[in-house]
Amino acid sequence: MMIIGEKINGTRKQVGAAIRERDAALIEKLAREQVEAGAQYLDVNAGTEPEREADDLVWLVQVVQQAVEVPLCLDSPNATTLKLAITAVDRQPMINSISGEPERLEQVLPLVADHQCPVIVLALDDNGIPKTVDERLNIIDRLVNATRESGISDEKLYIDPLIMAISTADDAGIVACETMRRVRQQYPDAHITGGLSNMSFGSPMRKCINQAFLVLAIEAGMDAAIMDPLAPGMVPLLLAAEAVLGRDRFCNQYNRAFRAGKLDLV
Ligand code: THG
């Protein structure tokens, strides 16, 4: 499982304030902590008003890449921001994301093709949140046709089922897992990702939901989670689930984490 650290996100209060105040120390700390806890990519999302989001994201990119060695996952709803941010990175980033929204696809797909970078393929278009698994698969099929036609190989794709909150729909977990299962079958060379913590928005004791969903998502085929690697229990459960599913040869990763004292559940 690849971990994409989610904590540098301006929609979080503390991070939003740090961005506005150009408080590099807090951002650097979040970067180092997540990498130390096992993040292999860091998601960076400025989450600020459209007028300043591009400047803010470029600042975040500069701060984070001075603090850590891992590549970034450039997370923005704005194609122009992504174009600008990609010029500020010094390691090949992941692009978060392309979707079936025509304007976004038109602008971001060429960027991905030119840079040949990994890209998140989000099961969303301009018809609102897709409700069923079939609707999601239809969007994903269209998007994978488009990436293939642009010369982007399936190994570069991180397909995201668009994880929603169970507090707003009882079937959010089932729909996410079932979409991932079908993507795994249909696109065996592509990766599967998603914002794990979305599932617990609006629920009490969010870490319980996140822990349960992590294990189920791994079983359904997720191999790259956008998550908080510092949240209690998450990395131990991730390692245990992969070992149980036979995805950790000789339980090497699990045993190594044990010896490093990294398997505590709290
Ligand atoms: N798919 C893709 N990208 C994404 C998402 C996705 N990027 C954003 C988001 N979803 C994933 N990142 C987060 C980051 C934080 C939280 C959830 C998802 C979160 N934060 C708490 C809060 O805001 O209440 C943390 C509180 C705190 O620690 O301050 O829940 O789905 N491609």
Image: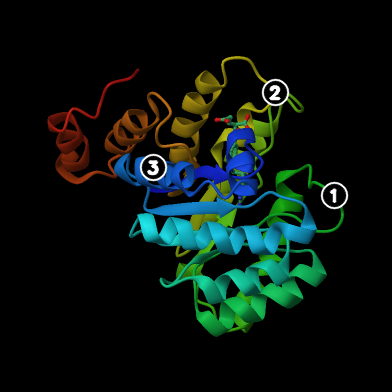
Residue at the disc numbered 3: 34
Q: Is residue 19 left or right of residue 248?
A: right
Residue at the disc numbered 1: 128
Is tag 3's residue or tag 2's residue first in the polypeptide sequence?
A: 3
Up-down: is 198 above or below 40? above
Residue 95 in view? yes
- Mark 2 falls on what kind of element? loop
Is tag 1's residue or tag 3's residue first in the polypeptide sequence?
A: 3
Is tag 1's residue or tag 2's residue first in the polypeptide sequence?
A: 1
The circle on residue 202 is 2
- The amino acid type of the residue labelled 2 equals Gly
Question: Where residue 239 sits in the image (x, y, percent)?
Answer: 30, 35
Mark 1 or 2: in front is: 2
Q: Residue at x 69, y 37 (%)?
A: 164
Q: Residue at x 44, y 39 (%)?
A: 218
Q: Nearer the viewer, residue 261 or 193?
A: 261
Residues at marks 1 and 2, CA–CA distance in whole angstroms: 20 Å
Picture quarter with the C terminus: top left
